[in-house]
């Protein structure tokens, strides 16, 4: 089995991607960031707002449009109601990221096994899985940037094909900006340049100035043209939104400098190996390629430091760090591939037994644990429960057996299979935990026989479910309505149902229903009041 896995690395990567990033893409409800992207994509198709992008009819210039264009193309091809189709471009760009990771890792070390290890670690890292299965911007920005870094590395290392590598590097770095602005330039490209300059040095540039200039021209052109366009066509809104977005980087979600110091935990099942690979004094004499290890480690550490300097911090901002971190972890895993069965130190083996033994044990206890946890909620999900139980129990035995006989490569591949089965067979079980007796989709108002207006706006998820651009009215506009015909009004949900009290003198107000898009009931901690809206019917008094 191992020989086949390593003989056909691209097939191995493709199979892993299929299991992890394509399976059940439409299972989860769209989150707030996806809803914003999906609404903007829908309005590209329905309103033609491809350049001056909108959300619910209002300017939406916070993010460049490239990921939304790709989402719109997929939605147009497979249907805008198909959530899996809207997430498919993100999964596809993740596949490109994985292939480029394999190629760059192989170029860096001239070692195919290391390259495969690194790619499998990346593809099974927690936040990579999350981002690659979500229809949001982050994965596009960092995937395009990594492609650009691959060609930039080629440009630095080779004198041949300088123009080709420079132009392709410029193209993909520019596309990264078109995906989420300068985020990946700061979090992925700048640390790469610092690490490369320290470890490999910038040598032999005398003959590369012209292609370098061409690369910079392409980067600047691709990065700036859309911003210039929206500024020229809609100066007021572009300026207002740019000012608001700039202020969020220094005055929003403020966290201490050390907030990211647990960054290695974002890799999920690789948390312990990720921590160990950062211990340079321990690993420096054990890795197969010291210079490449120093480069990957420095790239990772510099990325964390640079992100830590920004006052605004969120755990998802660590996504780009997981890319060089996977390369760093790869050196430790490769060392275990070659030497685990000959290691005599108990202190060196204990973390390995603990980490992979824990994963194997989870597989062994999953059938009983899942049954006790889900209970009668398994009704309708027994097929996936049985299949996932068989797969994870079998994988647990596989991991423990090969851990016992000290065949670490198969322990590693068993861990990758564990993640694949968890997503492919176990993910549908998440629906067993859902259920909201008060769930009420606002999309039912699409066919309303009376006009429907929105007061004070709606949450992006509600806008997405509503299915079309809402017609917003201010309090003054509602109060001055001269129509004698009834009309509907959507407002933010309140217990007192008092949002329209200002109309009571002139209008009869009937509270009809509350829309609730929460997939879980109100007793759960993750329940969100912003996913609720009250609906009234209003008619002028005789």
Image: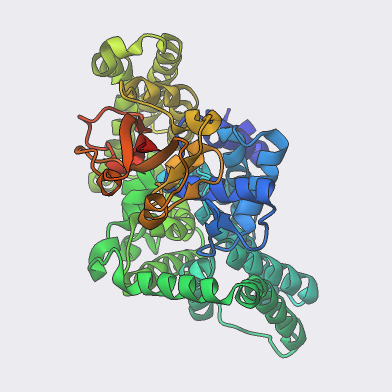
Q: Is residue 301 left or right of residue 194?
A: left
* Tag count: 0
Camera-nearest residue between 255 and 20: 255
Residue 402 visible somewhere in the drawing: yes
Question: Residue 431 appears in which quarter of the rendering?
Answer: top left
Residue at point 41%, 10% (across, down)? 380
Camera-nearest residue between 475 and 370: 475
Residue 189 visible somewhere in the drawing: no
Q: Is residue 65 above or below residue 344?
A: below
Q: In the rendering, at what x and y percent does residue 353 appear?
A: 29, 36
Q: In the rendering, at what x and y percent does residue 502 appear?
A: 27, 49
Q: Is residue 51 left or right of residue 2?
A: right
Q: Is residue 162 above or below residue 51?
A: below
Question: Residue 490 appears in which quarter of the rendering?
Answer: top left
Residue at point 50%, 37% (across, down)? 466
Question: Residue 157 appears in which quarter of the rendering?
Answer: bottom right
Q: In the rendering, at what x and y percent does residue 350 appear?
A: 25, 42
Q: Is residue 131 left or right of residue 512?
A: right
Q: Quadrant of the C terminus?
A: top left
Q: In the rendering, at what x and y percent does residue 137 appear?
A: 53, 55
Q: Is residue 180 above or below residue 12?
A: below
Q: Residue furthest front?
A: 542
């Amino acid at each position: 089995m191992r020989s086949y896995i390593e003989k056909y690395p691209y097939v191995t990567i493709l199979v892993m991607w299929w299991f992890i990033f394509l399976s059940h893409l439409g299972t989860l409800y769209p989150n707030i960031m996806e809803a914003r992207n999906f609404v903007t994509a829908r309005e590209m198709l329905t309103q033609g707002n491809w350049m001056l992008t909108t959300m619910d009819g209002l300017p939406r210039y916070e993010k460049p449009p490239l990921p939304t264009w790709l989402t719109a193309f997929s939605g147009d091809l497979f249907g805008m109601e198909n959530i899996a189709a809207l997430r498919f471009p993100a999964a596809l760009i993740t596949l490109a990221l994985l292939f480029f990771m394999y190629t760059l890792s192989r170029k860096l070390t001239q070692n195919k096994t290391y390259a495969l290890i690194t790619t499998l670690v990346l593809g099974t890292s927690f936040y990579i899985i999350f981002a690659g299965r979500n229809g949001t911007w982050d994965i596009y920005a960092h995937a395009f940037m990594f492609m650009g870094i691959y060609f930039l590395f080629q440009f630095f290392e080779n004198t041949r094909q300088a123009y080709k590598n420079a132009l392709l590097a410029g193209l993909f770095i520019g596309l990264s900006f078109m995906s989420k602005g300068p985020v990946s330039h700061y979090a992925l490209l700048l640390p790469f340049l610092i690490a490369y300059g320290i470890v490999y040095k910038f040598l032999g540039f005398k003959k590369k100035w012209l292609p370098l200039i061409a690369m910079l021209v392409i980067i600047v052109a691709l990065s700036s043209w859309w911003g210039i366009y929206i500024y020229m066509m809609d100066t007021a809104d572009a300026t207002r939104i740019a000012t608001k977005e700039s202020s969020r980087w220094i005055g929003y979600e403020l966290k201490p400098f050390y907030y990211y110091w647990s960054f290695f935990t974002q890799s999920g099942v690789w948390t312990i190996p990720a921590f160990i690979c950062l211990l340079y004094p321990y690993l420096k004499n054990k890795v197969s390629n010291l210079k490449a290890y120093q480069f990957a480690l420095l790239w990772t550490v510099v990325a964390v430091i640079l992100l830590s300097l920004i006052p605004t911090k969120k755990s998802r901002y660590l996504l780009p760090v997981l890319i060089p971190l996977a390369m760093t972890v790869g050196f430790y895993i490769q060392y275990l591939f070659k030497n685990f069965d000959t290691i005599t130190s108990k202190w060196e083996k204990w973390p390995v037994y603990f980490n992979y033994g824990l994963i194997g044990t989870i597989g062994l206890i999953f059938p009983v644990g899942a049954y006790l946890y889900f209970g009668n909620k398994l009704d309708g999900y027994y097929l996936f429960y049985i299949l996932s139980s068989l797969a994870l129990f079998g994988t647990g035995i596989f991991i423990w057996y090969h851990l016992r006989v000290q065949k670490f490569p198969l322990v590693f591949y068993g861990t990758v299979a564990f993640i694949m089965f968890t997503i492919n067979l176990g993910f549908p079980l998440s629906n067993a935990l859902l259920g909201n007796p008060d769930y009420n989709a606002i999309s039912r108002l699409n066919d309303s026989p009376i006009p429907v207006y929105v007061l004070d706006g709606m949450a992006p998820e509600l806008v997405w479910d509503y299915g079309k651009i809402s017609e917003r009215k201010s309090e003054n506009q509602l109060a001055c309505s001269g129509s004698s015909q009834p009309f509907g009004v959507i407002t933010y949900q309140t217990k007192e149902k008092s949002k329209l009290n200002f109309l009571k003198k002139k209008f009869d107000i009937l509270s009809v229903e509350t829309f609730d898009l929460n997939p879980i009931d109100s007793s759960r901690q993750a329940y969100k009041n912003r996913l609720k809206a009250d609906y009234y019917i209003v008619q002028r008094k005789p």
